Amino acid sequence: MPWNIPIFLTWMRVLLIPVFTLLFFLPKGWVAPETVNWTAAIIFALAAVTDWFDGFLARLWKQTSDFGAFLDPVADKLMVATALLLLISLGRTYVIFAIIIIGREITISALREWMAQMGRRSSVAVATIGKFKTAAQMVAIFLLLLASNQFDNIFYLTGNILMFIASVLTLWSMFYYLKIAWQEIK
C-alpha cells in the first residue's frame, strides 16, 4: 500500500467517521446540542472537501494508485451512509432518501466492479450528473446536520428540499449508468 498525502487524507476521512458518530451519542449535558450539530457539520464538510482534494492532489502529483482508487469511494460512501443513518435516527430526514442514495451507491459500485472485470470500467466513469448528485447530497447533509428537529428550521427545510433533489439526481444518474452499461453488455 503506497503512503502519500492523498492516501493519508483518505484514511483521515475513514478515521473521522467514529468521531463524527460519537458526537451524537455523548451523554446529555456534556456538550450543547448546537455545538454537536456544528462540530458534526464541520467534520462532514472537512470530509467532503478532502474527498475532492485528495483526488486533485493525487492527479496533480501523479500519485494515483489502485489502492487509492479503491479506498477513496469507500471512505466517501461510509461517511455519507453514516451521516444519513444518523440524520434518520435524529428525525431530520426521511428513510426513503437514504434507501435511494445508499441503494444507488451499492448498485453502481457493483456495476463498476463488474464492468472492471470485463475490462470496461471506463465506460461507467463518473459523469457530470453524478457530480451534481454528489454536490446536492453533500450540501443537504451539511444543512441537515445543522438542523434541529423543528419543521420551521430553515436548515431542516432547505436540507430536505436538497435531499429530495439529490434523490431525484441519484435515480437519474443510476439509470444513466445502467443504460451505458447495458449498451456495453449488448
Image (spheres, rainbow, N blue to C red):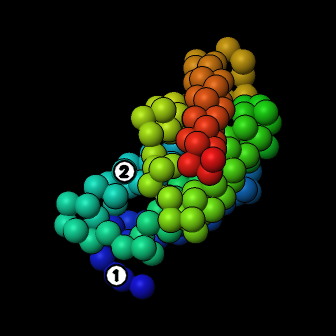
Q: Residue at x 63, y 47 (%)?
A: 186
Q: Nearer the viewer, residue 177 or 9?
A: 177
Q: Is residue 21 above or below residue 149?
A: below
Q: Which of 38 and 32 is in front in this view?
A: 38
Identify the residue position indicated by label 2 in the image. 52
Identify the residue position indicated by label 1 in the image. 3
Q: Measured from the top left, where is residue 83 in percent x and y?
A: 64, 48
Residue 129 appears in the rendering: yes
- Asked whether, in this view, residue 130 is left or right of residue 58, the answer is right
Toward the left, the furthest residue is 61
Q: How far apart are marks 1 and 2 (CA)?
A: 18 Å
Q: Measured from the top left, where is residue 50 in percent x and y?
A: 38, 55
Which quadrant, please, contains the N terminus? bottom left
Q: Which residue is drawn at 62% across and 51% down?
A: 185
- Asked whether, in this view, residue 164 is left or right of residue 10, the answer is right
Q: Which amino acid does label 1 sit on?
A: Trp
The local crowd at label 1, few if under 14, some if 14 to 19, many if 20 or more residues have their Cα within 10 Å, is: few
**SS label for mark 1:** loop
